[in-house]
Image (cartoon, rainbow, N blue to C red):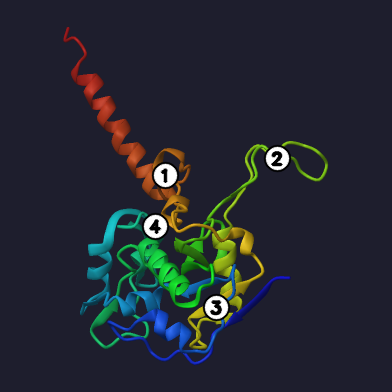
Amino acid sequence: MLTVFALEGIREIEPGDDLVETILGTGIRLENGDILVVTSKIVSKAEGRYVRATDREEAITAETVRTVASRTSHGHTTRIVENRLGIVSAAAGVDASNTPEGWVLLLPVDPDASARDLAARLRDATGAQVGVIVSDTLGRPWRQGQADVAIGGGGVRMILDLRGTVDAGGKPLTVTAVCVADELAATADLVKGKTDGKPVAVVRGRGDLVGGLDLPGAAGVVRRREADMFWLGTAEALEQGYREGYSAGAQAVSQRPRP
């Protein structure tokens, strides 16, 4: 049976706080196979990922590797960008909510490393074979609203690859690879909530997904450029195509023999 519950009594996290002590301080008795889903915001706060920014847009620009799409509506510009972690999201993951005035919060430097460290120390402290997912909230192409996904993982399988198996009707599965890490993150958010002050949840009953700390992390879930059919937004793709076409045409004209 699958059980999901949020941990109660976690106070506001400050830079330097020990999240293992904070989690165990709630009185939770962890069991083998438990998966803890930890909101990235408290990981960032504990790691001191605050930066001073009078203008949030400046912080977004600093964290941006490339712009996927940018749209302005009613005087407000929304930027979908790839950040330094390779994650494509709005505003590069820069968070200005629940932060001191004049400061913004960045994502953890290495969410996979953070998740592995938490998993390792929780295992040492409790003797229970647990896994950790660091989650963040992202929008999704073609879908309204946002959902939580895994941006870091430690000791948890990220992808359940069913290719090479057969379905209930005996037909071979050739492309099915389920991102169970994202499913776990979204499930945990149902009990954590966005405004309830419950940044950690425990998913119990999927111990089959818990394994060694050397399992691949969430960085491997990010689709690479060569496999990404939607590398750019529509307007940006048209603009790039125009530039490349114009450049190729100009080069061809310049190479024509003159009469």
Q: Amino acid at mark 4?
A: Ile
> Which residue is drawn at the image coordinates 58% and 66% (left, top)?
184
Residue 94, labelled with which disc?
none
Nearest to the eye among marks 3 and 4: give it. 3
Please report whichever mark, 3 or 4, sits nearer to the chain's N-terminal start. 4
Structural distance between the alpha carbons of marks 3 and 4: 23 Å
Q: Quadrant of the C terminus?
A: top left
Q: Which residue is mark 4?
A: 87
> Which class describes the residues within 10 Å of circle 4: few (<14), some (14-19), or many (20+)?
some
Structural distance between the alpha carbons of marks 1 and 4: 10 Å
Q: Which residue is mark 3?
A: 201
Structural distance between the alpha carbons of marks 3 and 1: 30 Å
Residue 224, labelled with which disc?
1
Q: Is residue 20 above or below residue 230?
A: below
How many marks are shown on the rendered structure?
4
Circle 2/circle 1 CB separation < 8 Å:
no
Residue 165, labelled with which disc?
2
Structural distance between the alpha carbons of marks 2 and 1: 25 Å
Circle 3/circle 1 CB separation < 8 Å:
no
Please report whichever mark, 2 or 1, sits nearer to the chain's N-terminal start. 2
Please report whichever mark, 2 or 4, sits nearer to the chain's N-terminal start. 4
